[in-house]
Image: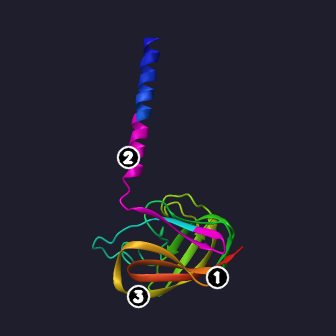
Amino acid sequence: MYNMSKRLFFVATSSALFLGMATVALAQYKSPHESTSVEVGGHKITITYGRPSQHGRKMIGEHEPYGKVWRTGADEATTIETDAALDINGLKVPAGTYALFTIPDPHSWTLIINKTAKQWGAFSYKESTDLGRTKMEVAKLSAPVEEFTITMTPAGSDGFTLKLSWQDVEVSVPVKVNP
């Protein structure tokens, strides 16, 4: 009986310690996390992402290299959740929750909508689970953006412009809501 009590105490203590460490790990993201939303025609679209900062580093093209899949933020993969079908520059996206990745390039970025919404960064990313890809326009900013920022600006009664801004770059793509 004494050994069983000892084992039970060990299991309970180990479990509590593990849960405590997991909670602390989740609370210690290096980048703040944010959700941004837009409502179009009574439909809500929400993007949730980590917001890394430059901290004096050259991020796009170096830390986040050109030609490679990027999680488009920090920590977990950025997600887009929509309660209506979307048309993202010709890419048809049914209502649901998806991971949002990009491939940076000096002249034209690629936006990737991936069916595996819950994943850590792009470490487990598989092209075979892409819903699809579309091109994004690239513009140089006149003033640098320290912290990665995603915005969705209404455009007409049935759409919005998705913009990603960081460093001296802003990439954008038109989105139409198809209820």
At which x and y percent is residue 67?
47, 78
Q: Residues in magenta?
A: 17-45
Closer to us: 48 or 91 = 48
Residue that badge 2 annotates: 24
Q: Nearer the viewer, residue 117 or 163?
A: 163
User: Which class describes the residues within 10 Å of circle 3: few (<14), some (14-19), or many (20+)?
Assistant: few
Please check the rendered image and state whether residue 20 is part of the magenta-colored stretch, yes or no.
yes
Quadrant position of residue 136: bottom right
In the structure shown, which secondary structural element does the residue marked by tag 3 occupy?
A: strand
Going 46% across and 22% down the picture, which residue do you hit? Answer: 8
Q: Nearer the viewer, residue 65 or 152?
A: 152
Q: Residue reaching furthest top?
A: 1
1 or 2: tag closer to the N-terminus: 2
User: Which residue corresponds to the image point at 42% horizontal and 50% vertical from the top-left?
Assistant: 26
Name which residue type carries label 1.
Ser
Check disc 2 and give the amino acid type. Answer: Val
For the C terminus, the quadrant is: bottom right
On screen, residue 8 above or below 57: above
Q: Earlier in the sequence, mark 3 or mark 1?
A: 3
Kindly identify which residue carries mark 1. Answer: 157
Looking at the rendered structure, which numbered label has been put on residue 140?
3
- Residue 152: image x %, image y %? 53, 76
81 on left or right of 78: right
Looking at the picture, how far across and down is residue 48, in whole percent?
Answer: 51, 64
What secondary structure is found at the residue carrying circle 1? loop
Q: Residue at x 47, y 16 (%)?
A: 4
Circle 2 Cα neighbour tier, 10 Å, few/some/many (<14 / 14–19 / ≥20): few
Near mark 1 (Cα within 10 A), the count class, few <14, some 14-19 or many ≥20, is few
